[in-house]
Structure formats: structure tokens, C-alpha cells
Amino acid sequence: MGNKVSVGLLGLGVVGSGVIKIIESHQEKLMHQLGCEVQVKSVLVRNPEKQRDVNTDRTFLTTNPDDVLNDPEIDVIVEVMGGIDEARQHILNAFKAKKHVVTANKDLVALHGKELQNAASQNKCDFYYEASVAGGIPILRGITDGLSSDRIQQVMGIVNGTTNYILTKMDNEGMSYEDALKEAQELGFAEADPTADVGGLDAARKMAILGRLAFSTDVDLEDVEVSGIKNIALEDLQYGNQLGYTMKLIGNANFSNQQLEVEVQPTLLSKEHPLSDVKNEYNAVYVYGEAVGETMFYGPGAGSLPTATAIVSDVVALIKNMLLGVTGNQFVEPYFKKELKTPAERLGQYYVRLHANDEPGVFQAISSLFNQFGMSFKHILQTPLEKHGLAEIVLVTHQTSLENFHNILEELPKLDGVLEIKGHYKVEGDAEQ
């Protein structure tokens, strides 16, 4: 290795440019920490002539992956090209060439993380992916290192900045979903095609990664129950505020009695909960450990330099392993066999808003139905609608099973006088009105 570690970069977009900027501008600190120089030697790009955010000697740019992956002078590969299949193959080839890998690719890690980790271990290589979840927030290292001695019971977070920005604008300013999304796109917080973000898939991929590390069990993307924010109505945000809640797209992973549940869904969060104050494009992850209790990690969840900071921190950790001669020992096999909770075992509070005839006996029938399933009410609101003879009813339950709540949603529309369920969401925390 000598007095220099050479890095090969796969991709030179926004994040890749940030990696080069940080490595070049932080050389003095890197030298102090590692005792050696860190240098980007070669960069794989699709178009060497393209104008970029960073000035790079074009002799370092290549369109041939072999120039990076099989260069004997390159020790570390940083994958920031995005996508799944091509990136996966490049990383597998890097491990075969005995090169260590750092990636920010959440999609790849969520879908193929176990395969890649096994390939790294077999080739005595390290595989780091801190930047794949929550950008510049060191949440993965916080879980695997900082809380390694604890038994983590819950990981709950706002892990998608696009949806958090949209919901903040809807909640605080009364913007429509469409207007808030358009503003997020204009500011660069949302992609031209925001489907993965607003549909909850982006957050689900991150929660699969977090659950896997926090609970030392296999968590696959299909284990995550997902719903997005596209159908949230302003009325539900307004009623939530009235009851002491704010709406967030929450990723929630729980592990108890060696059973797992992982979900991503719009959630009415108590304003007393620390996550409720996380606004706009920021991310935060709340972790509850058996010994440590409540902790929270907060910061920018995306962006060139925050994400690049996490990547270069992984590079530093990896080089320290190289200096100590302990690479290839990072991966720990899952300790617990995966067992998912059934709907009957998944407990929570729930909000439901419905339209019904405003006449005697209707609410009594609704109450009887809830009572039939052993459910009671924490909050009840009833508001006459402008259309004569109709009422809007908002109910928040005490804790019950998901199975019971699904049964309620199926049976409510069958009651005489109940016209339509307008919205329903999970509720987290105790709100103070």
C-alpha cells in the first residue's frame, strides 16, 4: 500500500463529484488520520466530454470498467453510479479482483446486500454502505458500532426527504399534494419521476437495510409493508393537528420476542414525539435500545457533500482496516432466524375518518361494531357536513391488533348509515390536546 491509497470511482454524478471534492480538500486531515495520502486514480463515466461539477483531469476518466476494476494500483472501489444490475456486477468483479468496496446504492444493498457481503467475505474484502441510508447521518455505524452491546427493539425514522418536504408544506402551509410536489421538484428535493419516493419504496429499501443491521436477522424488501403519501387529504392533516398529531411518512421496524415487523406508511405522529419536529428535506432515525433507551440521529438525508461525507468516512474506516491487516472480517452472520409477526400480533393505534348519515342510531352502530372487536376510542370528533343530513366522524382507537383494524375497515361500510371511509392511518405516541 505504501504511502498512498488509490481509489477507483464508478460514476461521476452529483455524489461522485462530492467524493472527489472532499478527498481533494481534506487531504491534510486524511493524512493525519491515516498516515498516507488518499487519491482518486481513475473514474468510470459514460461520457468523458460531459461538463461536471468538479474539475477532473480527463486522462483519469474512462468508459472501460476494466480500467478501474482491474488496475493493480487501485485498492478501493467507490460505487456511485446508481442502478442495480450493472452496479452489482461491477462490485462482484471488484471483489474477485480483491478490491474493497464502498457504495451509496440503497437499492442494490436492499436487494442484493447479503450476496455482496458474502462475496466480500469470501475474498477477504470489506464492503461498506453507510451512505445508502439517510445520507450524511452516521446511522448504520451508530447501530453496528455505537449500539453493538445493546439489544435494539425499535428503529423508527423519517428516511425520505422528498416526502417529508411535501408533508411539511401540506401540514404547515396547507399546500395541496400536487403543489408541494411541484415545489420540491423545482428545489431539487424530488426527482422528475418521484414514484419511488412518494410511493414509499425508497424508504422501504432503507428500512430493510436498517432492520437487517439493527436486529441481526435477514430482512428482505418483500418483508416491508409499504404505502405512500399520494392519497393523503388535507382534511386528515387538519384533524390530526386538532388532536395533537402531525403527519409523517414513517419507517418503523420492531423486534420483540424474536419476531419482526417492518413497515413504511403515513403515520399520525404525536407532537410530543422527537420525530415530529423533523421538517422539510431533513431525515431522522429514532432508535430504542433495551439498555440505552431513546436515541435519535438527525441531519441532511441527501445531497452531494453530506452523502459524500458518509462515503469518504467509509473509505477512511476501510483504510484503517487495511493498515491493521483485518479486512474481510466485518461481516457477521445473522443471529436470529427471521420470523414475521402476524396481523394478530402487530399492535398499534389507528385513526379513521368516515362519512355517515347524521341521524340517531348510526354512531351507536359504529360503537357496537368496534366493541365487537374489543376496540375502544381514545378520541372522537363529529362534525356536521354542509350537505344536509351528513356528518364527518373521526375516531382514534386505543391499542389494538392490525387484524382487528382490518376487520373494522371491512365491516364499517356494511353498516346502515355509513357512507364511505375517507381515510385511515396508523397513530404513534400519546398526543396532548
Image (cartoon, rainbow, N blue to C red):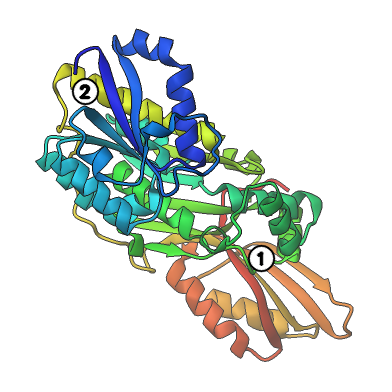
Is 106 situated left or right of 1 in this image? right
How far across and down, in percent of the image, does residue 325 sit?
A: 13, 21
Residue found at the far left of this picture: 122
Label 1 crowd (10 A; few <14 / some 14-19 / many >=20): some
Task: Find numbered disc 2 in the image and state the secondary structure of the residue it sits on.
Answer: helix
Q: Which mark is residue 232?
A: 1
How far across and down, in percent of the image, does residue 258 sit?
A: 25, 51
In front of the other: 249 or 272: 249
Label 2 crowd (10 A; few <14 / some 14-19 / many >=20): some
For discs 2 and 1, the disc positioned in front in the rendered view: 2
Mark 2 touches mark 1? (CB < 8 Å): no
Q: Residue at x 58, y 38 (%)?
A: 274
Earlier along the polypeptide chain: callout 2 or callout 1? 1
Question: Residue 153's quadrant in the figure?
Answer: top left
In front of the other: 64 or 302: 64
- Is any atom of residue 333 visible in this view? no
Between the C-alphas of marks 2 and 1, the distance is 47 Å
How far across and down, in percent of the image, does residue 201 sit?
A: 47, 60
Q: Which mark is residue 165?
A: none
Q: Is residue 86 above or below residue 320?
A: below
- Is any atom of residue 318 visible in this view? yes
Q: Residue at x 15, y 33 (%)?
A: 328
In front of the other: 419 or 142: 142
Which three-letter amino acid code belongs to the residue tagged 2? Asn
Task: Find numbered disc 1 in the image and state the secondary structure of the residue it sits on.
Answer: loop
Which three-letter amino acid code belongs to the residue tagged 1? Ile
Is 195 situated left or right of 354 in this image? left
Is 367 situated left or right of 157 in this image? right
**Image quadrant where one finds the N terminus:** top left
How far across and down, in percent of the image, does residue 417 sit?
A: 71, 89
Q: Which mark is residue 321?
A: 2
